[in-house]
Amino acid sequence: MSVTGRNQAEAVAVRELVVRYGKVEALRGVTLDMEWQTAVALLGPNGAGKTTLLRVLTTLLPRFTGSALVDGHDVRRAAADVRRVIGLMPQESNLYEELTAWENMKIQGGLYGMPASVVKDRAGRLLERMGLTTVANRPVSTYSGGMKRRLVYARTLLHDPPIVFLDEPTTGLDVQARAVLWEDIGGLLSSGRCVVLTTHYIEEAERLCRRVVVLDHGRVIADGSPDQLKIAGEETLEEVILNLTGRELRLG
């Protein structure tokens, strides 16, 4: 995958995005650009608007005001075009558990009209990268939670998307599997992709992302590199988040 010839200089462009659920404003005038060959972490407390923003950008939530472009495609008017250029790893498993890993990958390839030979080649390499080759012919229902998570990640990348959205990608993974995924995400950037992730692991954001966007109550309250955000003398990004968003527990 190369970004050469992509539709826009920016992978993602959002302007004055507002999302309402009844009387609740989940997003309040969010404006953002996200560049190619960049990993962007969306951080903030529960209910800050992170997943809502991802749902808009991946065409899952079409009810909003403002505008959102992904690779130059309007997420409402050209949803099919957007889906072709993105990969989405959701928080929850969306695998066919009665099927094998290979069968899950074949179904995914069919959704994108990929030739069987290409699916076989790419799926084989992805399953190997995720340490799933030896169990690829077993029903997914026999997998551990971490194995399922790695398979969801592999399936997300099967059609070689230039823009990848990862919603809490390493939740449920052990230390070794998390390290493997971190290394793989780094490889995505070297090929020019834009990677957008939400995470509650602050060290994950610091390690993977040169840009951090902090959301709170549906607004962008900070945007920059981890070092740029440490403007009040904080030693860690976790301290930055706590100072910006408060230390009280929140529901949802």
Image: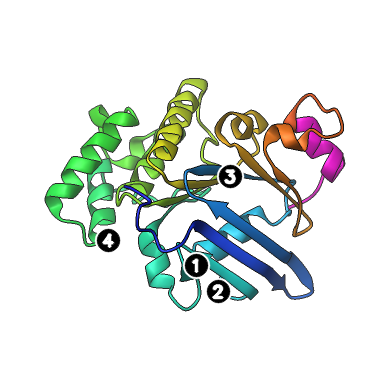
Tag of residue 59: 1
Q: Residues within 10 Å of mark 1 (few under 14, many from 20)?
A: many
Q: Horizontally, is 111 left or right of 15 in the view?
A: left
Q: Residues within 10 Å of mark 2 (few under 14, many from 20)?
A: some
Q: Horizontally, is 220 left or right of 123 in the view?
A: right
Q: CA distance from mark 4 to mark 1?
A: 16 Å
Circles 1, 2 touching at the beta carbon (< 8 Å): yes
Q: CA distance from mark 1 to mark 3?
A: 19 Å
Describe the element under mark 1 as helix, strand or loop. Answer: loop
Circles 3, 4 touching at the beta carbon (< 8 Å): no
Circles 4, 2 touching at the beta carbon (< 8 Å): no
State the residue position of label 3: 40
State the residue position of label 2: 62
Query: Which residue is at 65% across, 53% downward?
Result: 50
Q: Earlier in the sequence, mark 1 or mark 3?
A: 3
The segment highlighted magenta reads 238-252
Is residue 185 placed above or below 157 in the rendered structure?
above
Which amino acid lies under the numbered mark 3 shown in the image of this protein? Answer: Val
Tag of residue 112: 4
Describe the element under mark 3 as helix, strand or loop. Answer: strand
Q: Earlier in the sequence, mark 3 or mark 4?
A: 3
72 or 207, nearer to the observer: 72
132 or 13, nearer to the observer: 13
Residue 169 picture location, percent across and down: 51, 40
Q: CA distance from mark 3 to mark 4?
A: 26 Å
Q: Earlier in the sequence, mark 4 or mark 2?
A: 2
Is residue 14 placed above or below 215 in the rendered structure?
below
